[in-house]
Amino acid sequence: MTTTPSDPTPALPGRPPIVDLATWQAARDELLVREKAHTREGDAIAAARRRLPMVELDGAVEIVGPDGPVPFLDLFQGRDELVVYKHMWYDGAPHQGQCEGCTTTAWHLKDAVYLNARGVSFAILTTGRWDEVASYVEFMGYPQPWYSVRDVEAPVGGAMGHIICFLRDGDRVFLTYSTTGRGNEPVNGSLGLLDMTPYGRREAWEDNPEGWPEAPQAGSPVGGHGSPICWYWRSDADGVATWGPTSRPVPQWTRPGATPVETLGRHGHHH
């Protein structure tokens, strides 16, 4: 059954108004104008990003991977461009105590075949000791190349938790771009899809209509009302958002053989 604007169906609590298809299409077309402007501005920003100046660095600086110390230059795998994700690390923490945000990002970057096809290599760097990192990578089943940059200076080492891009010219290596904060979001396709859904990310900072269901309450801000940004997701075995000793980054529950309860210990409870 369809309805006309002059004969509206009563609105459902906490839902958008109900209209006929033509009325919906008109509203959707109006929003499309703003979406197209947003796309064009994004294209212009990307063009400016490609014109940023570069910083040369020592491509021979050594980092540690599965085959021991290798020069940073090796991460390019012979390609001209390199995208790196810098994964935060908590020394001594069990696997389920590692960063939920970085886990989420790494999970969405399971392989780089499409990047490779465009001449771009990808790697994950972290400040953890290699033995801890190798065990974690095996636990998660990550196929990406991982390396430890412990005690390596920025921009190869340094602060973690963001994306950074490099360009190679022969044996010369240049820093070209890095993200901050929510600049990591393009990696996470789940966020883009949630932004299209009626309830969005269900985070407290979002601007939602009056009467919209609040984000799920939890014993902590994570995944519920008050969460600062959407990728801070941890849950227990029942999928309840929590920071408690039975919680872990959400992707880890899908890992084959994951046990329902493991004690985090004193290192595993992080904000």
Image (cartoon, rainbow, N blue to C red):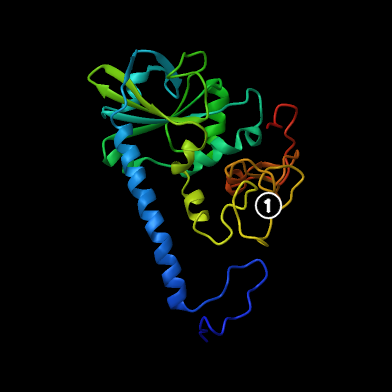
On-image quarter of the C terminus: top right
Residue 243 image offset from top left, x and y in percent: 72, 40
Q: Tell which of 268 and 228 is nearer to you.
A: 228
For residue 51, above or below residue 193: above
For residue 111, above or below residue 129: below
**Residue at 49 percent of width and 31 percent of height:** 180
On the question of residue 141 being in view, the answer is: no
**Element at label 1:** loop
Q: Is residue 267 left or right of residue 31?
A: right
Residue 45 image offset from top left, x and y in percent: 35, 38
Q: Residue furthest bottom?
A: 1
On the question of residue 266 being in view, the answer is: yes
Residue 265, by quadrant, is top right
For residue 176, above or below residue 225: above
Residue 17 image offset from top left, x and y in percent: 58, 71
Q: Tell which of 214 and 253 is nearer to you.
A: 214
**Residue at 52 percent of width and 25 percent of height:** 160
Packing grade of label 1 (10 A; few <14, some 14-19, many >=20) is: few
Q: Amino acid at mark 1?
A: Gly
Q: Residue furthest left?
A: 170
**Residue highlighted by disc 1:** 239
**Residue at 51 percent of width and 84 percent of height:** 2
**Residue at 30 percent of width and 19 percent of height:** 173
Residue 91 image offset from top left, x and y in percent: 63, 22
Q: How many marks?
A: 1
Q: Tell which of 25 and 231 is nearer to you.
A: 25
